[in-house]
Image (cartoon, rainbow, N blue to C red):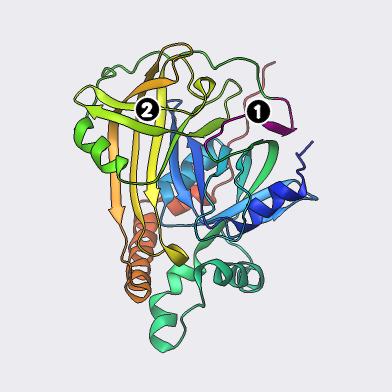
């Protein structure tokens, strides 16, 4: 059965400007990225949601291949909710690649304007932002477990709604063939990420669903980025693939700053500290001016859609997903 949740949690899901999405990589790691959930949820059906762009084909293909995802509602900045609770929703995602135009205009458009401001229109803007607005992909997540902590650092005893969480930490993973050491400049990466106020760590839980927790960057050097958590139980012992996201944003999501990593996490039992060795890194900084931001969004949406078509990503996404294998 899908999970249900109380009014206080629902107000957070309705009000948060941004959430952290974690999805599974083919190698058994997790990627953590920021999305704008615009209050999408249906308590009766037990679903939450967000939208993304067809231009992010790699993310969509991975979610389609393994629909187990997590959404972490981790900051009240520039949102409408007030209670300082951290909410983690885990569930199975369904992509709608060709949504009904009426649904986009009637449901997604007004919701987006509440959080992101009025939509620009006119001959130029309608043409320039056509791909940005029209090629949105609604992602519906059937929640099977929701966990809520009493503060944004995930301190204190959490409340559970839905299926019970697995007992104990997930088992350590075998190290990658190319080794676990940093593959990018860890000291420089950590220094950049440390300047951003919201830092989140993602990894696979014992049941295969991503887990996302807030962490702090205590130090960084050639060996990796030192992470700490409010509760030592939030960081699993042993070694594993993990994703790390550091980000910030202004009103209506202008002035975005993002540092995103995949890599290897190592921690000792009960220490509350971990060493993170980044293997890949992506970062960007969006304009602080809304008009410049929309110009950039329009350009990126056009380029992303062209790439999705030319690379065959769009065709692959439109094919029916493979049937799960069945044992005889």
Upstream in the sequence, badge 1 or badge 2?
1
Q: Which residue is mark 1?
A: 157
Taking the spot 49% from the left edge, 19% from the top edge, the residue there is 236
Task: Residue 68: give x, y in percent of width and height.
Answer: 58, 35
Please name whichever residue, 80 or 101, is drawn nearer the observer in this view of the structure. 80
Q: Main secondary structure of the magenta part?
A: loop
Please name whichever residue, 86 or 264, is drawn nearer the observer in this view of the structure. 86
- On residue 215, the disc is none
Query: Where are the magenta residues, as a range?
Result: 153-164
Relative placement, left or right, of 66 versus 328 is left
Relative placement, left or right, of 172 versus 177 is right
Q: Quadrant of the N terminus?
A: top right
Please name whichever residue, 185 or 154, is drawn nearer the observer in this view of the structure. 154
| Mark 1 surroundings: few (<14), some (14-19) or many (≥20) residues within 10 A | few
Q: Which residue is mark 2?
A: 227
Task: Residue 83: give x, y in percent of width and height.
Answer: 63, 50
Do we see residue 184 in this rendering?
Answer: no
């Amino acid at each position: 059965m899908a999970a249900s949740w109380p009014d206080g949690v629902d107000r957070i899901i309705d009000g948060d400007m941004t959430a952290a999405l974690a999805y599974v990589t083919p190698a058994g790691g997790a990627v953590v990225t920021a999305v704008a959930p615009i209050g999408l949820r249906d308590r009766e059906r037990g679903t939450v949601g967000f939208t993304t762009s067809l231009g992010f084909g790699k993310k969509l293909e991975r979610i389609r291949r393994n629909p187990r995802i997590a959404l972490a509602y981790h900051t009240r900045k520039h949102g409408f909710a007030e209670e300082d609770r951290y909410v983690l929703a885990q569930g199975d995602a369904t992509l709608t690649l060709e949504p009904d135009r009426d649904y986009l205009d009637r449901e997604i458009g007004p919701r987006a304007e509440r959080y992101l401001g009025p939509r620009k229109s006119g001959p130029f803007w309608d043409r320039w932002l056509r791909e940005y607005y029209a090629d949105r992909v609604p992602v519906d997540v059937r929640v099977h477990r929701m966990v809520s902590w009493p503060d944004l650092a995930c301190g204190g005893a959490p409340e559970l709604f839905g299926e019970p969480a697995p007992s104990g930490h997930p088992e350590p993973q075998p190290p990658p063939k190319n080794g676990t050491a940093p593959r990018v400049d860890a000291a420089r990466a950590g220094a950049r990420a440390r300047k951003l106020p919201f830092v989140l760590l993602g990894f696979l839980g014992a049941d295969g669903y991503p887990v996302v927790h807030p962490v702090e960057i205590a130090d960084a050097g050639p060996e990796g980025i030192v992470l700490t958590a409010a509760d030592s139980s939030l960081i699993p012992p042993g070694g594993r693939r993990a994703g790390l996201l550091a980000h910030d944003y202004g009103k209506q999501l202008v002035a975005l700053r993002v540092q995103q990593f995949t890599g290897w996490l190592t921690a000792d039992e009960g220490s509350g500290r971990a060493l993170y060795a980044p293997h890949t890194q992506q970062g960007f900084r969006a304009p602080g001016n809304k008009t410049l931001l929309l110009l950039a969004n329009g350009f990126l949406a056009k380029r992303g859609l062209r790439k999705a078509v030319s690379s065959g990503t769009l065709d692959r996404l439109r094919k029916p997903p493979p049937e799960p294998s069945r044992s005889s």
